[in-house]
Amino acid sequence: MKKFEKIRSLRKIRTSILIFLVVLLATVGFASASPVANFTANPTSGQIVTSTGLPVQFTDTSTGGPMINWTWNFGDGSPLDHAINPSHSYVTAGTFPVNLIVWNVTPEFSQVTHNVTIIPLAQFVPFNSTGNAPFNLQLTDTSFGQPNIWLWSFGDGNTSAVQNPSNLYTHSGTYKVNLSIERNLQTNMSANGTVIVNPLAGFTINPSPGFVINSSTFQNTVFQFNGTATGTPVVSYLWNFGDGSTSSQAATGNQSNTTHTYPIANTYLTNLTVFGSGGTVSATVDESLQVYPVADFITPTNTVAGRLVQFNDNSSGGFNSDITGPRTWAWTFGDGATADSQNPTHIFQPGRYTVTLTVTKNGLANTTSKIISTDSPNLYLLRSGINGNTYYFMANKYGIPPLGIIRFAAYPTRSVLNTRLISTPTTIGTTYRWDFYGANTLTHIGPIVTSNYYIDQQFRTEDIYTVVLNVTDSRDTYTVTKPRLVVVRGSAGGGI
């Protein structure tokens, strides 16, 4: 039994020795094959397009193993790597020598070097930009590949070699901005941007505010528009006057002057747009313009105390229609009475009154006042004629300085609804004789015979005059005498 166990132990020892010899022979056999280092890179050349760099996959293709160690040097100063098939991201542009050293079990080693080329990417912000001249453009380099050389071209002839430059555009136009970068002899020139520099418009209006066209005097009606533009060259100016009318002018410089008138009172939003070279255009510049109405009315020529007087509105600014905006009239007749119609009537007592009209159009108001005289001594009854026809004469006893001229006028009357109204006389077949007698100097002026219903008489001698009028029409002759009507004080040519 013991003999059997001993034989069995010897057999185990012999088997172990055999296995060791086999392994030793195998090891010695492999170690006799020297290693040959090699690898592939994917890609071997590429551009950095992200902030994390360009990843490159390295694959070991060495022969002569088995290998027991790999040492990678990626050539960009990064730490060594001992992976069999590493991946590495390059954040810096350049051509980098990648070295691989492999070791086998002998130990023997082998090394190999291949180049990897990394190309930078040029880019910047703002890539496209728009502004008004003068426009200061600030640029920020956002390129990939850590460039250390920059060359900027701004499209206006200016260049720069700093990383984050600025450029002042003083002229309107469309400009191409280009950036070229370089690092370790690797360059990229693909960054292009567009800068649109628009002209900057501005203008003034004179007068502002102002008035509409005055149908009576034609004053204060022409508005002068003075436009300016920065960022020449300017191609044209477009005016919009706010009332539906426009004016386009070819540019002759950086100024544009034009005029405009407004027939309707209103608040207008006027604006100017300037067109520059290269299809550039300014932002529209707005100005608010208040154009006021002009209040006016026709002064009655036959204002008689106790009789109906017709007032006729003659205001300018759109008072004949409310289509162009709301309109109102506010009359005060100087005696406490008012009216709000366009053409009111009124009856005055004897005296002198200030009649005031305030007109409002589209919320803008204007006021005018005139003196109305209805002094009773200015109107004198001749006598009743045939069929109730009656004549009056009226004298402007206040005179017209400086020559002491007084207007004398004769008027017939007519009956309308039991109210006697003064009418403008017709002169056909009617003659008027005027005589003036001085009380102190015995001066006699006249007879003055005319077919016109009024005369303008000048008094040169200081005195008190009696006025005698004879009116002859197809029916009869009417006579009226007014003693001591005209008083002339001072030297000849003085006031009344």
Image: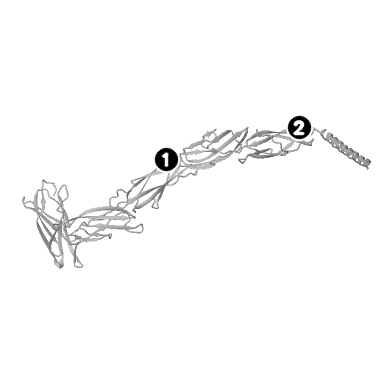
- The residue located at (31%, 55%) in the rendering is 360
Mark 2 is on which residue type? Ser
Local SS, label 2: strand
| Residue 39 or residue 77, whichever sits in front | 77
Which of the 4 quarters of the picture holds residue 54? top right
Local SS, label 1: loop
Q: Is residue 57 above or below residue 301?
A: above
User: Label for residue 480?
Assistant: none
Mark 1 is on which residue type? Asn
**Residue 419 in the image, given as x and y percentages of width and height:** 19, 66
Q: Residues within 10 Å of mark 1 (few under 14, many from 20)?
A: some
**Which numbered mark, 1 or 2, is in the foreground of this view?**
2
Numbered marks: total? 2
**Residue 88 in the image, given as x and y percentages of width and height:** 67, 38
Q: Is residue 473 something one can see in this rendering?
A: no
- The residue located at (51%, 38%) in the rendering is 138
Q: Residues within 10 Å of mark 2 (few under 14, many from 20)?
A: some
**Residue 96 in the image, given as x and y percentages of width and height:** 67, 33
User: Label for residue 110?
Assistant: 2
Quadrant location of the N terminus in the rendered image:
top right
Instruction: Please give the residue where the numbered disc 1 appears in the rendered image.
Output: 254
| Residue 329 or residue 455, whichever sits in front | 329
Q: Is residue 366 something one can see in this rendering?
A: yes
Left or right of 364 in this view: 186 = right
| Residue 52 or residue 12, whichever sits in front | 12
